[in-house]
Image (tube, grey):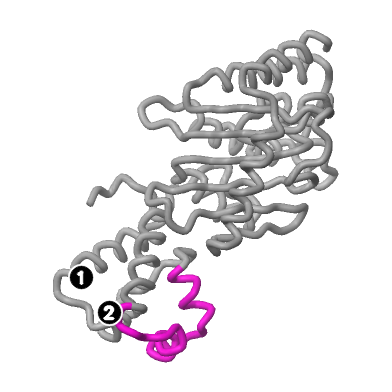
Amino acid sequence: MTNSASPTVYKRQLGMALESMREAAGQSVDTAATTLECSVAKIRRIEAGDSAVRASELKDLLDLFGATKSERKHMEELGREARKRQPKTAYGVVLPDFFRKFFSLEQIAVEILLYHGELIPGQFQTPGYARALIEANPAHTDDEEIDLLIQARQARQGRVTQAGDPQRHHVVLHESAIRTVVGSPEVMKDQLLHLRKLASLPHVTLQVIPFSAGAHAASGLPFILLRFQDNVRNVVYLENLTTAASLDEPTHVAQYEMAFRHVVGAALSPSKTSSLLATVAGEL
């Protein structure tokens, strides 16, 4: 095991391993909660990889599950890595609490499937587009805070453009997203050309659903689906103005995967999308 991965990776691995061991041992979530003298909700958070486990708690769970010596060694190492703190960033202080978990998960995902009907996604935004969008929200008036939020979006874009181990992206936008002028015609033209450049990367697929396609499976329902290396417990992220939800129940994830297949079918091909971006940019 290397120590280069994010603690988020180890939390997920530890949680899934504990859940598997609990089920193999025939123990219930309630029994695990009783053993740790905690709530059932805490056990579910641990198994979901949402929180780390104290060393003493991990020992009690491994005792309950009848872990072998080799299993204990592996699990204890996972636990140590999971308890490490994420490196601090300058922009971390301005990220909403509900967004921080997604931000960490997004960084470790190997593939992102995304649909949005109105806006260019954050990790594909130029600084000018991002600034205009953020400043349009009356909740953001502090210049320093706005600068940090733009930095956070550029950091997310780093996973799109990094060499060596790029993150795969399949993005479907509605034509509204590329026709809505955010900031100014100049800002929007720059954004569209930037989007076209990113779409030319071999690990990025971009498609646009034209107005002529009419209603589709995700009409009015923007979402992001994160897929991970093990393709287990993939996550759907849904966000509104003040809260967000992360869904990892397989039946929910499967519904969104089906919806994504439908929006892909309704969209223009990547080559026709690139031509449309150039056309719209030329009209500005």
Type of the residue with mark 2: Leu
| Placement of 47 over or under 284, stated as above or below | below
Residue 181 image position (x, y, % from top left): 83, 24
Q: Main secondary structure of the magenta part?
A: helix
Residue position marked by numbered label 2 in the rendering = 62
Q: Which one is in front, 276 or 80?
A: 276
Q: Residue at x 33, y 67 (%)?
A: 17
Span colored in magenta: 24-47
Quarter of the C terminus within the rendering = top right
The answer to if 45 sits in the magenta stretch is yes
Left or right, 167 with reference to 140: left
Residue position marked by numbered label 1 in the rendering = 71
Is the residue marked by circle 1 packed among few (<14), some (14-19), or many (20+) residues within 10 Å? few
Left or right, 138 with reference to 147: right
Seen as rendered, the residue at the extreme top is 282
Q: Do residues under tags 1 and 2 come within 8 Å of each other at their CB atoms?
A: yes
Q: Which one is in front, 26 or 240?
A: 26
The answer to if 239 sits in the magenta stretch is no
Left or right, 124 with reference to 129: left
Residue 230 image position (x, y, % from top left): 38, 51
Marked residue nearer the N-terminal end (1 or 2):
2
